[in-house]
Image (spheres, helix red, strand yellow):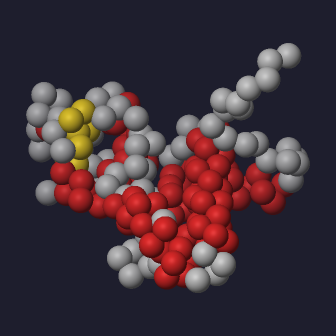
Amino acid sequence: MSTGKNTKGYETPNHPYQGERIAEESDLLSRYGLKNKEEFWRAQSELRSMRREARRLLGEAQGDVDVAQEAGAEFVARLRRIGILGDNDDISAVLSLDVTDLLERRLQTVAYRQGFASSTQQARQFIVHGHITVDGARVTRPSVKVDVDDEGAIAFDENSPLADDLHPERAESQE
């Protein structure tokens, strides 16, 4: 048996068979077009680590939000940059985040919301097949968190057949 860091990027639920939790996860999987529960659990683990960091900073500042805000300025700036926190939110807002806040910032969801695809599953396929670019660079990972500044820079790859407005798979709402 080797001793070392756990390399798995997520934690599975403690109780594998809870009907209510499974139904809730399945609903979110279909709503956000996730491939499997692992992607959902990975987002939950990421949120868990964000909350843990916020609690640590608040604890070191003994509950003083302003001191914690200064100590975690880079942490809060990163969350604002990717759109998880608003401009007016402070570090204590991290504790009230939900997993859907993270799922909304995935490239897959942002591309769907902007009308590049007619469903989240189609948005995922377009991304994986290399039809979508962010700021001119082809991105093939649907789970990439999109910065707020880069939202307007999402487009179809110029070499993609989907770049043609008349392509039959283009979403109807696309201009």
- In-image side of 105 versus 153 (left or right): right
Q: Residue at x 11, y 34 (%)?
A: 158
Residue 70 x, y percent position in the rendering? 45, 72
Above or below 10: residue 31: below
Q: What residue is at 49 percent from the left and 68 percent from the top?
A: 71
**Whether residue 2 is situated above or below residue 37 in the rendered picture:** above
Q: Quadrant of the C terminus?
A: bottom left
- Nearer to us in this view, 93 or 76: 76
Quadrant of res 99: bottom right
Residue that protrudes farthest toward the top in the picture: 1
Residue 169 point in image, percent of width and height: 27, 39
Q: Where does the image place residue 76, in percent across and percent down from the top left?
A: 44, 66
Observer-nearest of 168 and 120:
120
Quarter holding residue 54? bottom right
Q: Is residue 127 above or below residue 151?
A: above
Q: Quadrant of residue 135?
A: top left
Q: Residue at x 62, y 54 (%)?
A: 49
Q: Which of the image's four quarters has the N terminus?
A: top right
Residue toward you, 153 or 28: 153
Residue 57 in view of the camera: yes
Q: Is residue 66 left or right of residue 80?
A: right
Residue 80 in picture, x, y percent from top left: 38, 66
Q: Give the answer, above or below, for where 74 lies relative to 132.
A: below
Does residue 27 appear in this view? no
